Amino acid sequence: MYVILVYDIREDRVVRACKLCRRYLNWVQNSVFEGELTEAKLARLKSELSKIINKEYDSVLIYRLRDQKLAAKEVMGVERSPTDNIL
C-alpha cells in the first residue's frame, strides 16, 4: 500500500521521529513522508513512533492508498525531495 505520513511534533522529539520515518518512507518535506509499505512495516513504524511521540501534544496523520496511482500530486514552487516513488 502507498502511505503518506505527516506529523506535527514538538522540537525535542522531532529529530528522533524524522530519523525513524526515514527508515521506512521517503522524506518529502520537513514533516511529510511517503512511500510503499506492507501492513507489517506500517504496524512496526506506528509502534516505534508511538514510543517517541507524546499523544497529548503531538499529532501524526497517516493516509493509506491501495495504489499510488489513485492520487495526484501537484507541487507549487520547489520540490524539496524529488523521488521516483512519488504520487
Image (cartoon, rainbow, N blue to C red):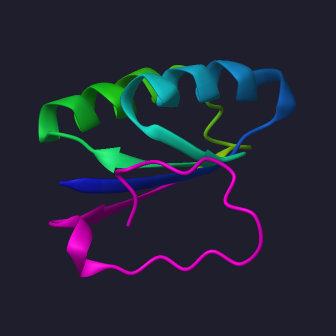
Which residue is depicted at the point 26% across and 56% down?
Answer: 2
Which residue is depicted at the point 68% across and 43% down?
Answer: 56
In the image, residue 60 sits, relative to residue 63, either above or below, namely: above
Residue 20: in magenta span: no
Point out residue 24 in the picture as x, y percentages from the top left corner: 37, 29
Point out residue 63 in the picture as x, y percentages from the top left corner: 38, 63
Which residue is depicted at the point 49% across and 31% down?
Answer: 21
Left or right: 1 as drawn, with respect to 85? left
Specify the quadrant that holds the C terminus: bottom left
In the image, residue 65 sits, relative to residue 1, either above or below, namely: below
Residue nearer the viewer, 75 or 53: 75
Left or right: 59 as drawn, with respect to 77? left
In the image, residue 77 sits, relative to residue 12, either above or below, namely: below
Point out residue 33 in the picture as x, y percentages from the top left corner: 51, 47
Please identify the residue farthest to the right as the structure is shown.
11
In which quadrant of the rendered view does residue 46 lie? top left
Q: How many marks?
A: 0
Residue nearer the viewer, 14 or 33: 33
In which quadrant of the rendered view does residue 52 lie? top right
Residue nearer the viewer, 12 or 35: 35
Specify the quadrant that holds the N terminus: bottom left
Residue nearer the viewer, 80 or 59: 80
Residue 66: in magenta span: yes
The dominant secondary structure in magenta is loop
Span highlighted in magenta in the image: 61-87
Point out residue 81 in the picture as x, y percentages from the top left corner: 61, 47
Which residue is depicted at the point 34% across and 47% down?
Answer: 35
Left or right: 35 as drawn, with respect to 74? left
Left or right: 71 as drawn, with respect to 65? right
